[in-house]
Amino acid sequence: MKKSFFVLGFITCFILGIGAMFEFLTWPYRGIIVFIGFLFLNFGLIPMYFYQKYRQAKS
């Protein structure tokens, strides 16, 4: 579970970083890339973080 958290965190940061680069250079599809990055963050990384904290507190 911890390894998948780090992999998802890396993918999320990578997508958001690429999206930020596209924003600064005003390249096309920058909004879509940033949106996908925030989707990964909000519906993947943050819930997984709180689930891990819940499991640690439970045991």
Image: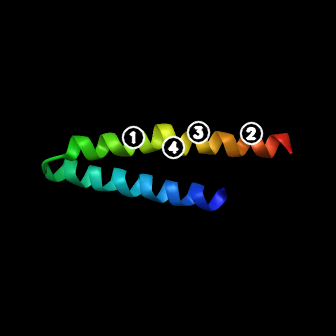
Q: Report the number of discs.
A: 4
Q: Which residue is mark 2?
A: 54
The amino acid pointed to by label 2 is Tyr
The amino acid pointed to by label 4 is Gly
Q: CA distance from mark 2 to mark 3?
A: 10 Å
Name the residue rendered at 83%, 40% in the picture: 58
Q: Earlier in the sequence, mark 1 or mark 2?
A: 1
Q: Which residue is mark 1?
A: 38
Name the residue rendered at 66%, 56% in the picture: 1
Q: CA distance from mark 4 to mark 1?
A: 9 Å
The amino acid pointed to by label 3 is Pro
The residue nearer to you, when weighing 14 against 3, is: 3
Name the residue rendered at 69%, 46% in the picture: 52
Q: Residues within 10 Å of mark 1 (few under 14, many from 20)?
A: some
> Are the residues flagged by discs 1 and 2 in contact, CB closer than 8 Å?
no
Task: Tell me the SS state at disc 4.
Answer: helix
Q: CA distance from mark 2 to mark 4?
A: 16 Å
